[in-house]
Image (cartoon, helix red, strand yellow):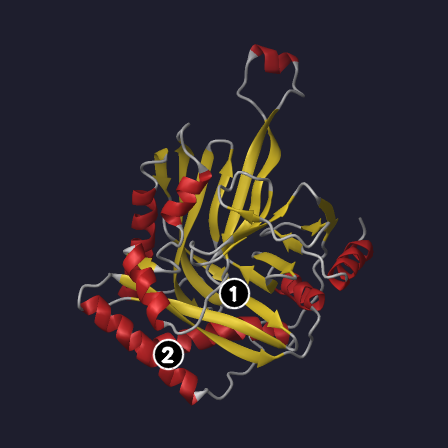
Amino acid sequence: MTKTDFFNSVFEHYGSQLPFVIYKKPNTTEVKGLLQESDTLIITEEFTEKGFVFSPFDDREDSVLIPLQDSKEISHNHVIEPTKSESRTKNPKADISAKNQHIDLVNNGVKAIKEGAFQKVVLSRKETILLKETHPISIFKNLLNTYPSAFVYCWYHPKVGLWLGATPETLLKIEANRFSIMALAGTQVYKGTLDVNWEDKEIQEQKVVTDFIVESLKNTTEKIKVSNTNTVKAGSLLHLKTMISAQLKSTSRLKEILNTIHPTPAVCGYPKQTAKNFILKHENYHRAYYTGFLGELNYDFKMAPRSSKRNIENRAYSITKKSTQLYVNLRCMQLQGDEAIIYIGGGITHNSIPEKEWEETVAKSLIIKNVLYP
């Protein structure tokens, strides 16, 4: 399908107020789409269906499925169009009220940590801005061109809302019985090099995330391997990243794995439940799908089997297995009319400095604003 035909199909579908998702995986050129044929709100609880799943931060709320069945699949190969350099949005004058509220929130979080309530908590805020360009497809194209190494998406359901994002963080990837997951934490502004020093606060934050994931996977996986921790660039920010891989046990179920790891300490805190309770009580706004997860659920893929005499004689032989690739919904926004609600946050530990945590949210907000005001 040509680029023009692809987006014309999406324009028409959106104009008919029917659910759809369009997306591109990191460092690929194929933009995919699922156009649901009806406006039925389909909920998944067991995560056994095939389709595209969109799940909230709070697992007590519904996960929405755009099903492969009853949806039209479309795709095209995207060629990156030149854009202006990143970080062209100037740092706006701070909203004093919002700043004070976030600093108070962080102070409360640090106090709770020092009192032994939890080791880490991820605290966030939302910001509403007036849109220069209100059509989601135009914003989606800006995201595609600006963040080729991110998972870029535009998701819409008339009974839920309209969300877009360019997230740097993979939650998990499963192909057959092969499992991998990313531990991403720590943030600093990119200044032209990946050779940077990390403070103890960021190093400890990354270790908490990694240790939690490894411990959580012990009942459902085996042969766990942990990579070295590297500095990676996401937009105009740097993060610490560790990859964890394993082999799923034959008795493992996706729902069980998701219940165990989501939300991870990278977006919630540790211990998970106490940190999550603190967030729900003190953030004073509804995260909805921010820091939830989204992506392909139980897609079929062809996998070459292990070598054997039969396979040598018939090289075309392959096995069809299921593949699931899910991403954490970061660097995202919700569109409502001529406004965008953007969501930003950061990990809090015992040595967090509230003023610096505020500045980190401002830096993250600029990433999204650069796309909205190209």
> Would you name the residue on which mark 1 appears?
331
Q: Is residue 277 visible?
A: yes
The percent position of residue 253, horizontal first and vertical second, equals 44, 36
Which SS class for mark 2?
A: helix
| Viewer-side residue, 56 vs 293 | 56
Residue count near mark 2 (Cα–Cα under 10 Å), binned few <14, some 14–19, many ≥20 = many
The furthest residue to the left: 115
The percent position of residue 159, horizontal first and vertical second, equals 62, 61
- Quarter residue 269 falls in: bottom left
> Would you name the residue on which mark 2 appears?
102
As drawn, the label of residue 282 is none
Q: Earlier in the sequence, mark 1 or mark 2?
A: 2
Relative horizontal placement of residue 149, taking residue 354 as reference (left or right): right
| Viewer-side residue, 40 vs 9 | 40
Kindly indicate whether the residue at mark 2 contacts the one at mark 1 (C-beta within 8 angstroms): no
The type of residue carrying mark 1 is: Arg
Q: Is residue 266 positioned above or below 281 on the image? A: above
Of marks 1 and 2, the one in the foreground: 2
The percent position of residue 346, horizontal first and vertical second, equals 38, 68
Q: Is residue 353 visible?
A: no
Whole-Å distance between the Cαs marked 1 and 2?
Answer: 18 Å
Residue at 42% x, 61% y: name it: 239
The furthest residue to the front: 40
The percent position of residue 49, horizontal first and vertical second, equals 57, 39
Q: Is residue 330 positioned above or below 315 on the image? A: below
Residue at 61% x, 58% y: name it: 153
Residue at 60% x, 11% y: name it: 310
Residue count near mark 1 (Cα–Cα under 10 Å), binned few <14, some 14–19, many ≥20 = many
| Viewer-side residue, 44 vs 264 | 44
